[in-house]
Image (spheres, rainbow, N blue to C red):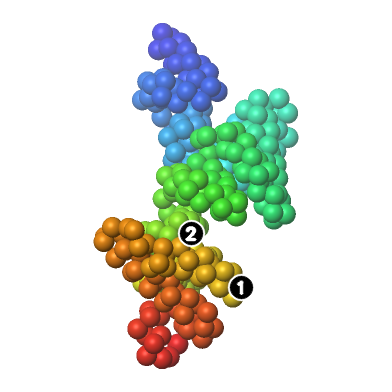
Amino acid sequence: MTTLIAIEDDLKKAQELLNKDDYDRAGYFVDRVSPHCPDAPEVLVMRADLLIGRGKYDDAASICWALLAKDRHNPDLMYLRGKALLYGGSTDQAIKHFQEALRADPDHTRARESFKLVKAMEKAKTAGNDAFKEGDCETAIQAYTDCLAMDPRNTTYNATIYCNRAAAKMKDKQYISALEDCDAALELSATYTKAVTRKGDCLLQLERFEDAVREFEKATQMEPDSNDFRKRLNNAKLELKKSLRKNYYKILDVAKDADDTDIKKAYKRAALKYHPDKWGQATEEEIERAEKTFKDIGEAYSLLSDPMKRRRYDAGQDLEEIEQGGGM
């Protein structure tokens, strides 16, 4: 009798702690009970709950599925399987399970709270996606930020949201912050290839070409059959090659999409600044540096003002290849 009372007391304490998501302390009481009744449905249900708390979602879902075969309308089992599916990345299926649990027991507190939470997260995610499509990056970023605050334990879902927020930040040219979001997504889900390639895109924008190549190589290793990843890897390698040449756009301080008028104005401005006549009173070292810069400015203008040479330069050829008339 004493043992039975102790078991009942431990089960009660375990359930109270599980209701609070206090898995470590709940595990202590479940472990004390298990040797006495390891196959009891109530204990197995708690085991499934603990597995969820420890991140073993597939195992938890399997236990619930086996128990549901014998008790298909049990709201606790429906709720727990829904939670396992949710944290395992199957959001739509999780919502259906929470709804089934509430149909069986409209007062099921945990199912109701989880249902409301996931619906709120989906609403925030959708708001972010819609704002992003409309080009409203600020609203999209805020919606994704709100979503991330709702359920920190939902790592799979949050990895997606971090990656989405990174896309919005990239569109808003916040590349450093976007890169941080990509890293946050990968910390939650190391094999998330979209986060890997988005990180590569961020690194390209930040002109960290060697790092970008490494990320796209990683993505192609994850998905060897992806033509898209191979193309993006080749592009990153091309950008790396370009970065090792003289950057004529930087020399003239113009954007890569500058038109002929912008290039001509930039050339005149730079040539005037570094013309040898301007440096007559400078030190020998300063004069030498100015002469080199003046030569580079002339070289940059000669190339960028010639449409054919510029096309070859943009395609990745260096000056020697261009002057030799190498094919594309």
Where is residue 297 shown, x and y percent of the image? 43, 71
Instruction: Locate residue 269 relative to residue 79 in the image: left or right.
Output: left
Residue at point 51%, 49% (across, down): 178
Residue at point 46%, 80% (across, down): 302
> Mark 2, residues whose alpha carbon is within 10 Å: few (<14), some, or many (≥20)?
some
Where is residue 111 shown, x and y percent of the image? 64, 31
The image's mark for residue 261 is: 1
What residue did someone put label 2 on? Answer: 205
First along the sequence among labels 1 and 2: 2
Instruction: Locate residue 282 relative to residue 72 in the image: left or right.
Output: left
* Mark 1: amino acid: Thr
Which of the two residues, 205 or 119, is positioned nearer the viewer here? 205
Which of the two residues, 324 or 33, is positioned nearer the viewer here? 324
Where is residue 200 shown, x and y percent of the image? 45, 59
Pick out the residue farthest to the left: 284
Residue at point 60%, 51% (across, down): 172
Pick out the residue farthest to the front: 281
* Mark 2: amino acid: Gln
Q: Which quarter of the picture shows residue 237? A: bottom left
Residue at point 37%, 85% (across, down): 321
Which of the two residues, 43 or 167, is positioned nearer the viewer here? 167
Secondary structure, mark 2, is helix
Above or below residue 120? Residue 11 is above
Which of the two residues, 84 or 258, is positioned nearer the viewer here? 258
> Mark 1, residues whose alpha carbon is within 10 Å: few (<14), some, or many (≥20)?
few
- Does any portion of residue 101 appear in the rendered image? no
Q: In the image, which is nearer the foreground, mark 1 or mark 2? A: 1
